[in-house]
Image (cartoon, rainbow, N blue to C red):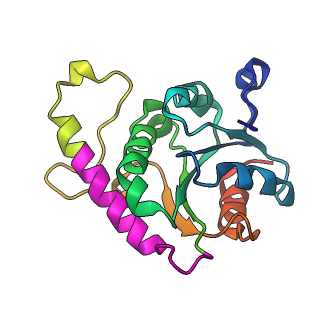
Amino acid sequence: MFGCLTASCLKSSKPNTIVLSGLSGSGKTVLFYQKGKIKPVHVIDVPGHARLKSKLDEVLPQAAGVVFVVDALDFLSSMQASAEYLYDILTKATVVKKRIPVLIFCNKTDKVTAHSKEFIKKQLEKEVNKLRESRNAISSADISDEVQLGLPGEAFNFSQCQNKVIVDEGAGLTGDVSAVEQFIREYVKP
């Protein structure tokens, strides 16, 4: 996409790197262009297309934080795919071991028909719980770089993650990205 996905950028290790991820159409690229408002930060926009998600494995080791963008307007039709992508991020050994914080940014909330961050959080937790149950049933020998989420015998919620997971909202097109700015101020080293 428009992010820094060249080989030279992937090799650099910066403590001020934010990885933008999420499905295609969620608004990652709009957020990428909003980064100028924020202190110096290296932003990598990982394409949301399924075939390009493998790029995530290349950039996560250098991440100071992950901003996972969800389309709050079209959430229900993309809920399962969003949950799968988020599950993949939250169970990456790199994310867990380095305790990389994740901001789930519910984008496009300026629209009247957009879902609230509370609704999206609750639905993502339910979907991640379903994924956790089905994937935990698979032999651990079949899972390569994955850490189990949540507490055994309890329904999953984001507070059970070893790394910090924050759910917030805004609208990239209108410039309402204060949640992203706050996340970067808090977790990215200058």
Where residue 164 appears, as percent x and y from the top left, is 49, 54
Q: Do we see residue 12 in this rendering? A: yes
Pick out the residue farthest to the bottom.
112
Q: Quadrant of the N terminus?
A: top right
User: Residue 124: x, y in percent?
Assistant: 36, 58
Placement of 122 over or under 36, stated as above or below: below
Horizontal side of residue 36 vs 23, given as left or right: right
Position in image of residue 103 (x %, y %) = 55, 56
Residue 144 falls in image quadrant: top left
Q: Nearer the viewer, residue 109 or 124?
A: 109
The residue located at (39%, 62%) in the rendering is: 76
At horizontal 42% and vertical 66% (from top left) the residue drawn is 120
Q: In the rendered view, does 152 fall on the left or right side of 36? A: left
Q: Nearer the viewer, residue 113 or 100?
A: 113
Q: Is residue 112 above or below residue 96?
A: below
Q: What secondary structure is the magenta-colored segment mainly? A: helix
Q: How many marks?
A: 0
The residue at the point 39 percent across, 72 percent down is 119
Residue 46 location (% of width, % of height): 62, 37
Magenta stretch: residue 156 in it?
A: no
Is residue 90 or residue 85 the one in the foreground? 85
Q: Which residues are magenta?
A: 110-131
Residue 122 among magenta residues: yes
Q: Nearer the viewer, residue 83 or 150?
A: 83
What is the quadrant of residue 178 in the picture? Answer: bottom right
Where residue 111 sits, quadrant-wise, is bottom right
